[in-house]
Amino acid sequence: MSARRATALAVALLAAFAAFAVGAPPAAAEPRATTIPDQPARIVLDDGWTATTAGAEALAADPDAPRVTATHADGGTLAITVAPAPNIDAWRTKKRRAYLAEIVAGFRAEPGVTVDKHRDTRVKGVPTLELWLTRQVDGAREHVVVRLLLFRTRTVAAAAAGPRAARKRLEAAARGLEPLHEADPDR
């Protein structure tokens, strides 16, 4: 992924929050999984989150629209987007660190966005990058937690945003994004 593509992904994620209205849905009793349409991933959300999956018509009209959006009863928001960006270098040991640094640089290049920290990990064998961001929204600081699943042929991203007091809840929501199956390391 080039730095330009990483920046474009960052813009899409941060703009995704403007794509839906925040409501106050009723709290759910147990965590529940929502499969991302036509993707090898799902999101598992805890109590208080209500997820909505984008329909085929909405995605046909805007392929960059969030695949899943969610709101929390306390005001947090979550959006899941998909970028058809190959991530081959994320799977190569020698190139992985530089590749992930490019993605982080793309987020840092966004005006008004501060990357507080980031972490490189694997989820079910899929290279994953987690970022903790701060941004200004209408004069107030908003905290954003992002998880990027770096599949070989695409990037599936979850971004959860809200006030600092909700940071742990936002982390749990973003970390709910996971591959459906264990990755084949030999593929």
Image: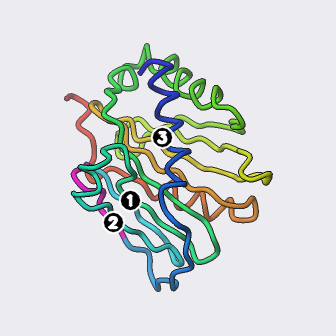
Quarter of the rendering containing residue 185? top left
Q: What residue does disc 1 label?
A: 68
User: Residue 105: which quarter of the image?
Assistant: top right
Q: Nearer the viewer, residue 120 or 110?
A: 110
Q: CA distance from mark 2 to mark 1?
A: 8 Å
Quick one: 125 or 152, which is closer to the camera? 152
Q: CA distance from mark 3 to mark 2?
A: 21 Å
- Based on the picture, tell me whether residue 35 belongs to the magenta stretch: yes
From the viewer's perspective, is residue 15 above or below residue 171?
Answer: above
Q: Is residue 157 above or below residue 83?
A: below
Judge from the rendering whether residue 34 lies leftward or rightward of residue 187; answer left or right.
Answer: right
Mark closer to the chain start, 2 or 1? 2
Question: In the rendered image, which quarter contains the N terminus?
Answer: top left
The circle on residue 34 is: 2
Of the two numbered discs 3 and 2 on the same chain, state the one appearing first in sequence: 3
Residue at x 33%, y 64% (from the top left corner): 53
Provide residue 95's location: percent of width, then percent of height: 43, 15
| Earlier-in-chain disc, 3 versus 1 | 3
Tags 2 and 1 touching, CB below 8 Å: yes
Q: Residue 7's spot in the image, x, y percent? A: 52, 28
Left or right position of 187 against 136: left
Q: Which quadrant of the rendered structure holds the C terminus?
A: top left
Q: Give the residue at x 61% y 56%.
A: 161
Question: Hey, what amino acid is under mark 3?
Answer: Ala
Picture residue at 56% right of the left edge, 62% below the top: 77
Q: CA distance from mark 3 to mark 1?
A: 14 Å
The amino acid type of the residue labelled 2 equals Thr
Camera-nearest label, 2 or 1? 1
| Furthest residue toward front | 61
Q: Report the magenta residues as a range.
A: 33-39
- Identify the residue under disc 3: 12
Q: Amino acid at mark 1?
A: Val
